[in-house]
Image (cartoon, rainbow, N blue to C red):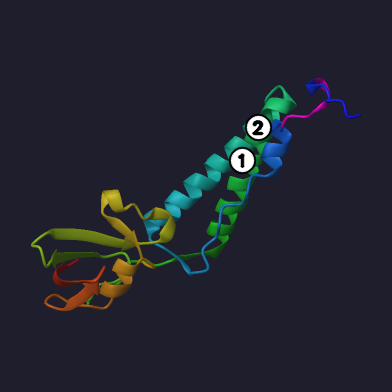
Amino acid sequence: MFRTMSVAFTREEDLEATAADLADRPISPHPNLVTPEGLALIEAELAAARAAYTAAQVKGSIESDRTAMARATRDLRYWSARRASAQLMEPTQDDGGVRFGGSVSIEREDGRAQTWRIVGEDEADPAQGSVSHVSPLARALLGKRVGDEAVVAGQSVEITAVG
C-alpha cells in the first residue's frame, strides 16, 4: 500500500538551486578585436560587474541574494575574460577599403541604402548601425572598395561609400 507524501516533505526548486544552474555567458572563439569605444564599453561593463558583485555580497538575506550573487559572479567572469583578451585596433589610415572600425554604405538590389560601422562583437548593435566584424555582413564587405559588389544574405549589394 502506497501513501502520498505530504507536500511539506517535498522541496520546491529554491533560489540556491536556480543560482547554481546559471550558465556562464558564452565566450566567442573569434579574436576579440575592439575599437577604442569598444574597449571603454568592456571596461565600463567590468566595473559594473564588480559593483554588482560587491553589492550582492553586502546585501541582507543570503537566500534572496544567491541569484544576484550568481549573476554578478557570472558577469564578472565574462567581462574579465573579454577584457583580458581584448585586442585594441586603433584607427588606421584610410586606404579606401572597408576595414575594422570604419563605416561602409551599401545599396541593395531593391534600392535600400544602408550604412554600417564594423566593430567588435561586444559593441555591435545592428539597431544602431554597427555590426560585428565576424558577422556575415562584415565578412562579405571587409576589404571591398567603392563600386565593388558583394553577396549579403543571398543578395548582391554595391559598396557606395567607405569611411
Does the magenta-highlighted stretch encompass residue 10? Answer: yes
113 left or right of 130 in image: left
* Distance of label 1 from label 2 (alpha carbons): 7 Å
Between residue 113 and residue 92, name the one nearer to us. Answer: 113
Pointer 1 local density, CA inside 10 Å: few below 14, some 14–19, many at least 20: many
- Secondary element at tag 2: helix
- Secondary element at tag 1: helix
Give the answer, above or below, for where 97 lies relative to 33: below
Residue 94 appears in the picture as rendered: no
Residue 7 occupies quadrant:
top right
The residue type indicated by label 1 comes to Ala
Residue that appears at 33% across and 73% down: 139
Q: Which residues are magenta?
A: 8-12
Residue hosting label 2: 56
Image coordinates of residue 23 in percent, x first then y, are 62, 49
Image coordinates of residue 32 in percent, x first then y, are 48, 65
Residue 100 appears in the picture as rendered: yes
Residue hosting label 1: 72
Pointer 2 local density, CA inside 10 Å: few below 14, some 14–19, many at least 20: many
